[in-house]
Amino acid sequence: MATSKRRNRTREQKQQADDARSDGNVAHSSGLIVRHADLTRARPFRWAWRGRVLLSYINLLVGEEGVGKGNLVAWIAAQLTLGELDGDLKGQPRKVMIVGDEDDFDHVWVPRLHVAGANLDNVVHLVSGPTGDIDVTSDAEAMRQLIADEGVVLAYFDQLLDNLGMTDSWKDKDVRMALAPLRHVARQTNVAALATLHPNKRKGSFRERVSGTPAFNALSRSSLLVATHPLDPDRVAVVRPKGNYSMEPPAFEFHIQQIMLTPPREGAEPIVTSKIVDTRESLLTKDELLAPPPARLQEDSKAGQARKQLAEMFADGQERPASEVIDQLTAQGITERTVTRAATEIGLKRRQEGFPAKWYWKRP
């Protein structure tokens, strides 16, 4: 009997070693799992949204309540369900999952996703888990199985703090322990975990403004800041203040448009919802979005001069060669970068023609 037990234990240990070795891990006789460097296992990072939302990792979306984070996520999700988001999954319609209920799914998310153009068949709402409300620590294995079975590529946590159980969000070690299972789930399933946090009222760097312990931002591999555009209160800007694995992408800007939607059922009442429109990339920097209104916003600053002169120059709706416009303003001591940024800020449209390429600007 003892010999049989030893034989079974040996088989189990061998099976464990074989399982560990299958992804490069080796079970050491000490009981520890080790991994030896092997270039054949090296892989490039993969992006759900290039330069902004990283697959297989935790990503943060930080912004004040009501600034437009939900509309942005609905746009990202819709693009993924259609296979149209710029990233490594482009051309491959995939599923997304909404976790939590800070915004009600039927009242808010479904209408918002629909007007964003999403394929609703590719949207999953995770309502609760074996322990009740979703807890990223205790429900990690169930989430891993669901994500793998459904083929989810983006899991959005509609207020991450609601999914941390009794964790003290101001204690570094507590947050690290609570999020460790979610990090493993993301790595094992190649899902992009995107989580919302609100900023605090402090000034300073982005790291200092993320609510709770700095561990949140430290564990995120890509953190996005969503805020009102410093030059146009009717627009929203998105920058990436923290990113580990790629060059910082351009700022992403949009306008939020209100939409009236009538559900396709008899007697349905119209629903007020919204979506993002007029999306574009710009030269806005993270420092400009984080800083209080700087001197450059004043009309007597170089940037203000450039915006004012460009607005006057293109008020007639005529198209002009960009090089001539830049030469005219740089002759007044305004740098080319300031001119091109001002052109973006006032919404000039760009058109390329000929070879070598010549650029033209025009007010829409």
Image (cartoon, grey):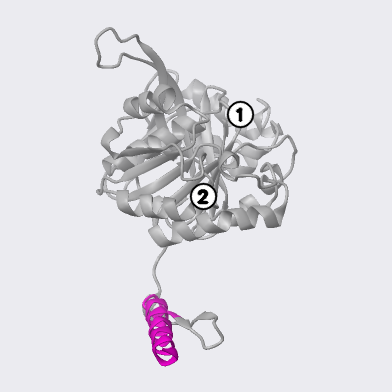
Q: Does dot 1 land on a helix, a strand or a loop?
A: helix
Which range of residues does the magenta coloring cover?
Answer: 1-25
Asked which quadrant contains residue 32, the reply is: bottom right
Q: Secondary structure at mark 2?
A: strand
Image quarter in which the C terminus is found: top left
**Left of 327 or right of it: where is 87?**
left
Residue drawn 47% across the image and 24% down it: 313
> Residue 59's spot in the image, x, y percent?
51, 49
Q: Amino acid at mark 1?
A: Gln
The percent position of residue 96, horizontal first and vertical second, equals 36, 42
Dot 2 or dot 1: first in sequence order is: 2
The image shows residue 65 at horizontal and vertical percentages of: 59, 28
Residue topped by disc 2: 59
Q: What residue sits right under mark 1 in the picture?
A: 305
The residue most toward the bottom is: 3
**In front of the other: 14 or 200:** 14
Image quadrant assignment for residue 42: bottom left
Residue 21 within the segment the image draws in magenta:
yes
Seen at 31% across and 48% down, the residue is 150
Q: CA distance from mark 2 to mark 1?
A: 38 Å
What secondary structure characterizes most of the magenta part?
A: helix
* Vertical order, 201 against 55 (above or below): above
